Image (cartoon, rainbow, N blue to C red):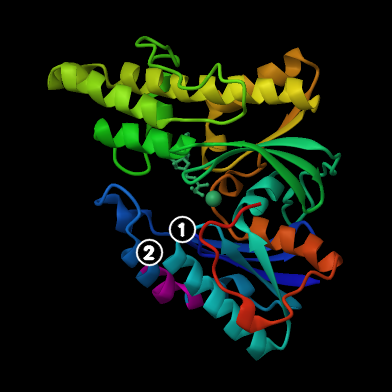
Amino acid sequence: MKILAIDTSCDETAAAITEERKVLSNVIYSQILLHQKWGGVVPSIAKRAHEERIDFVINKAIKQFKINAIAVTQGPGLAVALEVGIKKAKELTKKLKVKLITVNHIEGHLYSPFVQNKKGNPKIDFQFPYLGLVVSGGHTELVIFKDHLNYEVIGSTLDDAAGEALDKAGKLLGLGYPAGPVIEKLSLQVKNQDLYKFPRPMINSKDFNFSFSGLKTAFYYFLKKIPENKITKNLNYLASSFQNAVFDTLMKKTEKAIKYTGIKKVIVVGGVSANMDLRKRFRSLLKKINGEVLFPSYKYLSGDNAAMIGVVAYYKAKKNLYVENFDLIDRIPRMKL
Ligand code: KG4
Ligand code: ZN
């Protein structure tokens, strides 16, 4: 069964053709260049770019494939962006006389380590339960991934997401958008040292929730106190110390969740999971406790893409979870797992 999957949840117009867990084709048209000069995603610009590009992206993904079903991200995400994908998915479902499956975007990220290339790699199989950490520009969540399509969220951010915190700090440092990858490079220049020891909000709280806005505020006032030329000179130390504060928090909370749940199989997904320092930290933590950590196997799978949406849709199709009434399907910007 071949699925055409569509994701327009934020600033990438994405389409893929998947078959079970395999990605047969994948197209991502990033809007980063359009949003860059505004320092973040501008909804009206995102909407228009999705509208202008969606046919091109879908046609490029479809090639000669014969489609049996269509999958689309219903939420969470930017309302005006989600709408574009959903409208197109409904239109194509009617035209091609196939079935429609809606998918939660976070669910897609959770499945991303299991997404395979054409040759069926990676070969890893599901061994539930997993403890999932979703870290992206929009989300920071700790989830027990119990079985297919079965999740329990045990912690989330009370304010900014981890990627969002990195992006905001980067903006204050004049690093452009998105700042995560730039902060990673700057940090490497100083071997990821933690010179300034910025605060780690809620690191010792008893729950599994996160908070990054206090760190951002502390960082803002810290920068205000020091002269411009000192900021420029110490850009790498500042970036590295900020990254340390964010990652320490992620590690500590995940470690706490491992102890609480007893689950030693961890999956780390979402845009921030592309970061090599974060991956190293998780590998060493799980090695120490004889556990296992999985990440998305290919770089494009850590960011937003439609392949992961198609793979979730396959498991929904196996359970006959198709959309029955088209008219009831609308975007859900704050969709929960
Ligand atoms: O998953 P994603 O592409 O989009 C959302 O669903 O939000 O995540 C984007 C986020 C941005 O905040 C970006 O700065 C961050 O992921 N990011 C990184 C890296 N690459 C992307 N953060 C740290 N290190 C990276 N290498
Ligand atoms: Zn995402």
Q: Nearer the viewer, residue 314 or 20?
A: 314
Q: Residue furthest top?
A: 195
| Left or right, 204 with reference to 104 | left
Residues drawn in magenta = 49-55
Q: Secondary structure at mark 1?
A: loop
Q: Is residue 68 visible?
A: yes
Mark 1 near ligand 1 (CB under 8 Å)? yes
Q: Image quadrant for the N terminus?
A: bottom right
Label 2–label 1 contact, CB within 8 A: yes
Quadrant of the rendered image containing residue 212: top left
Q: Name the spot of residue 81 as percent of width and height, x first.
A: 45, 66
Q: Is residue 280 visible?
A: no
Crowding near the residue tagged with mark 2, few <14, some 14–19, many ≥20 C-alpha atoms within 10 Å: many
Quadrant of the rendered image containing residue 331: bottom right
**Dominant secondary structure of the magenta stretch?**
helix
Q: Residue shown at 81%/24% (left/top)? A: 262
Please check the rendered image and state whether residue 13 is part of the magenta-colored stretch, yes or no: no
Q: Name the spot of residue 202 as percent of width and height, x first.
A: 50, 22
Quadrant of the rendered image containing residue 201: top left
Q: Is residue 101 above or below residue 165?
A: below
| Left or right, 210 with reference to 336 | left
Crowding near the residue tagged with mark 1, few <14, some 14–19, many ≥20 C-alpha atoms within 10 Å: many
Of the numbered discs 2 and 1, the one sitting upstream in the chain is 1
Q: Nearer the viewer, residue 333 or 293?
A: 333
Residue where numbered disc 2 is placed: 46
Residue where numbered disc 1 is placed: 10
Could you say which disc has been placed on residue 87 in the image?
none
| Left or right, 231 with reference to 88 | left
How far apart are the two marked residues, 2 and 1, measured between alpha carbons? 7 Å
